[in-house]
Image: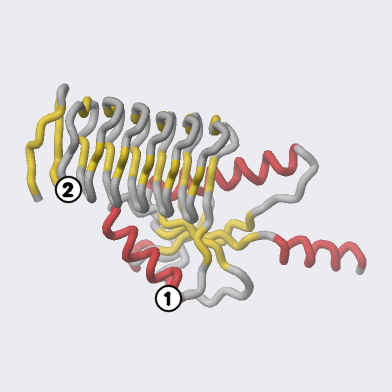
Amino acid sequence: MLLFYYVIEYMKALKKLIVIGAGGFGQEVFWVAENINQKNLSEGKPAEYEMIGYCDDNTSIQGKEIYSYKNLGVPEDLKINGNVYFFCSIGNNLIRKEVVARAIKLGWQPETLIDPSVIRAREVEVGDGTYVGAGTILSPNAKIGSHVIINLHCTIGHDSTLADYAHICPGSRLSGNTILKEGAFVASNSVTKQNIVMEEYSVLGASSFLVRNLPARCTALGNPARVIVKN
């Protein structure tokens, strides 16, 4: 009976983690949560998360198992006791902002997930609900907002600022003093010159080199990157 009691108390202490968005990136989010659990256990500490599963508005995939975790359906339909923590893995920054608001309205708490392999300097700030993937480097005095996605093997240069809902895709490099305003998007393997500003919901296309400030809601592509679309 005593062992059963301790098991119950242990399970209560775990954060109940839900990933909103049952796409491919959602798998990577659970992978990082698993890595955090494994690191804690290897250090003699308790695990941090109980993996609950995915939520997704696409009812056609309800019940589907992805990376060993089940899609439980639309967030508003779930009935879960205790404190629920969530990460929104939707890549579209505008939609992610809308869905985060829905989850917070349900009383769910945003969870910050930083892979144990991340190299993080002193004086780095990371906001609520942000994800930092494996192999990434966060340089001194970098300031990362809330609900930001920084994917695999990225470099965030010194004194850079990433506002809420920014998104950095795998292999990208932000040089020192880069500023990304809300919802700015940097596609895979792209680079910014130092002291660059990307305005709200601007997009830097894949494998591009940005050498000039990028206006809001514009897409730039190439080396050097040039504006190709104004939304």
Residue 170 occupies quadrant: top left
* Residue at mark 1 to residue at mark 2: CA–CA distance: 33 Å
Instruction: Identify which residue is drawn at 53% across, 77% down.
Output: 79
Answer yes or no: is residue 154 visible: no
Quickly name the residue at label 1: 76
Answer yes or no: is residue 181 visible: yes
Q: Is residue 108 left or right of residue 187?
A: right
Instruction: Identify which residue is drawn at 27% across, 45% down.
Output: 184
**What amino acid is at disc 1?**
Glu
Tag of residue 103:
none
Sequence order check, earlier mark of 1 and 2: 1
Q: Look at the image and tell me in which quarter the N terminus lies.
A: bottom right
Q: Is residue 219 left or right of residue 44?
A: left
Quickly name the residue at label 2: 216
Tell me whether the residue at label 1 lies in contact with that at label 2, contact meaning CB atoms closer than 8 angstroms: no
Instruction: For mark 1, give the secondary structure.
Output: helix
Closest to the camera, between mark 1 and mark 2, is: 2
Colour basis:
secondary structure
Q: Position of residue 69 (x, y in %)?
A: 52, 55
Instruction: Identify which residue is drawn at 37% across, 62% down.
Output: 61
Instruction: Judge whether 76 appears above or below 88 on screen.
Output: below
Instruction: For mark 2, give the secondary structure.
Output: loop
Label 1 crowding class (10 Å Cα cut-off): few <14, some 14-19, many 20+?
A: few
Instruction: Judge whether 58 appears above or below 196 on screen.
Output: below
**What amino acid is at disc 2?**
Ala
